[in-house]
Image (cartoon, coloured by chain):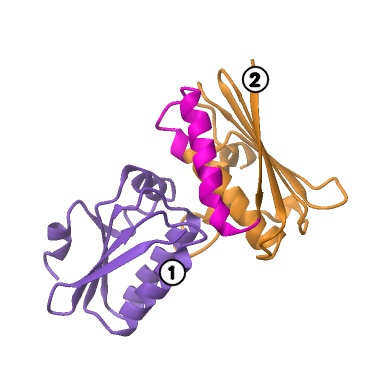
Chain colours: A purple, B orange
């Protein structure tokens, strides 16, 4: 099962990635490759919009954790927005809601970057 | 009365979504709380993913056999594979305070399910049994083990 990844430039080196579809073992590699490409382009900030992700598993979480670690190492901002209820629940179980910068809207996520 | 549904999928990640859909519909048709259903679906997905990754080393044409049993207040999943066995004592989630990729699948299973048992007392593979009380709020398997 593949995911759809749409990237839009917000100007000033800020990129928003809209992910559409389940992020599981069959699709997390695609997400990881896409995010890695963006990190390598040395963006100032990457905002990941999860509003169209109805399902995420541990491989998807691992991909986002990798993104977070990469952002820390490279002083880039890495923010998550609009988590669906299932995704938010998985983040809560994994106790990651306070580890990531999580926002309810893309507008909020873009503030202060 | 206990109802059972059996499902066999190849060890190809593209079939995980099929397994998830079947578990979801089985539980929704049984009037299981909509809050717990995604968590139970996650456990089945994570167990199958672990089998593909570790039991079958990524080989995509091996069988994963599942049996889902539902009673009024009880959900049991048995998942059988014929891959590499490992000592159940070695199947450990990573400490949750360590923020790093990997090791979360087993953590989710232990956190959500009430009972988790890996049986390797057979010639090949493993039989994983996971149980969840659908009515009460018993301690997670992780807390029972810990």
* Residue at (51% x, 61% y) in the render: A26
* Residue at (14% x, 65% y) in the render: A110
Q: What secondary structure is marked by label 2?
A: loop
* Residue at (53% x, 62% y) in the render: B102
Which quadrant is the C terminus of chain B positioned in? top right
For this orientation, the residue located farthest to the bottom is A41
Residue B25 in the magenta stretch? The answer is: yes
For this orientation, the residue located farthest to the top is B1
Q: State whether the magenta stretch is mostly helix, strand or loop.
A: helix
Chain to which mark 1 belongs: A
Expressed as whole percent of the image width and height from the top left, the position of residue B22 reads 53, 38
Q: Is residue B117 visible?
A: no
* Residue at (57% x, 39% y) in the render: B143
Which quadrant is the N terminus of chain B positioned in? top right
Q: Relative to the observer, which residue lies in front, B57 or A92?
A: B57
Q: Which residue is mark 1?
A: A30
Magenta-highlighted residues: B11-38
For this orientation, the residue located farthest to the right is B123
Task: Return the mark for residue B2.
Answer: 2
Chain to which mark 2 belongs: B
Residue A39 in the magenta stretch? The answer is: no
Expressed as whole percent of the image width and height from the top left, the position of residue A30 reads 43, 69
- Badge 2 crowding class, 10 Å Cα cut-off, few under 14, some 14 to 19, many 20 or more, is few
Left or right: A83 as drawn, with respect to B47: left
Left or right: A82 as drawn, with respect to B144: left
CB under 8 Å between discs 2 and 1: no
- Badge 1 crowding class, 10 Å Cα cut-off, few under 14, some 14 to 19, many 20 or more, is some
Expressed as whole percent of the image width and height from the top left, the position of residue B32 reads 47, 25
Q: Is residue B30 above or below residue A45?
A: above
Q: Is residue A89 above or below residue B53?
A: above
Q: Disc 2 to disc 1, how far (Cα)?
A: 40 Å
Q: What secondary structure is marked by label 1?
A: helix
């Amino acid at each position: 099962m593949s995911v759809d990844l749409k990237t839009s430039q917000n100007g000033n080196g800020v990129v928003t990635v809209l992910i559409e579809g389940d992020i599981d073992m069959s699709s997390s590699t695609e997400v990881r490759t896409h995010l890695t490409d963006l990190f390598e382009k040395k963006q100032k900030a990457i905002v990941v919009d999860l509003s169209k992700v109805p399902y995420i598993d541990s491989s998807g979480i691992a991909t986002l954790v990798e993104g977070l670690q990469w952002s820390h190492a490279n002083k880039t901002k890495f923010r998550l927005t609009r988590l669906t209820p299932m995704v938010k629940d998985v983040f809560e179980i994994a106790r990651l809601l306070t580890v990531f910068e999580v926002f309810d809207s893309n507008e909020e996520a873009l503030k202060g970057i | 009365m206990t109802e059972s549904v059996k499902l066999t999928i190849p060890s190809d990640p593209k079939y995980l979504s099929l397994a998830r859909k079947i578990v979801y519909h089985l539980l929704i048709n049984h009037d299981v709380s909509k809050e717990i259903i995604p968590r139970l679906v996650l456990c089945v997905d994570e167990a199958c993913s672990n089998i593909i990754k570790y039991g079958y080393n990524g080989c995509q044409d091996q069988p994963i056999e599942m049996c889902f049993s539902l009673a009024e207040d009880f959900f049991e999943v048995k998942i059988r594979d014929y891959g590499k066995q490992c000592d159940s004592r070695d199947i450990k989630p990573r400490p949750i305070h360590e923020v790093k990729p990997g090791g979360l699948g087993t953590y989710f299973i232990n956190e959500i399910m009430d009972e988790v048992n890996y049986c390797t007392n057979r010639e090949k593979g493993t039989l994983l049994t996971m149980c969840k009380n659908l009515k009460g709020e018993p301690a997670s398997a992780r807390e029972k083990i810990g």
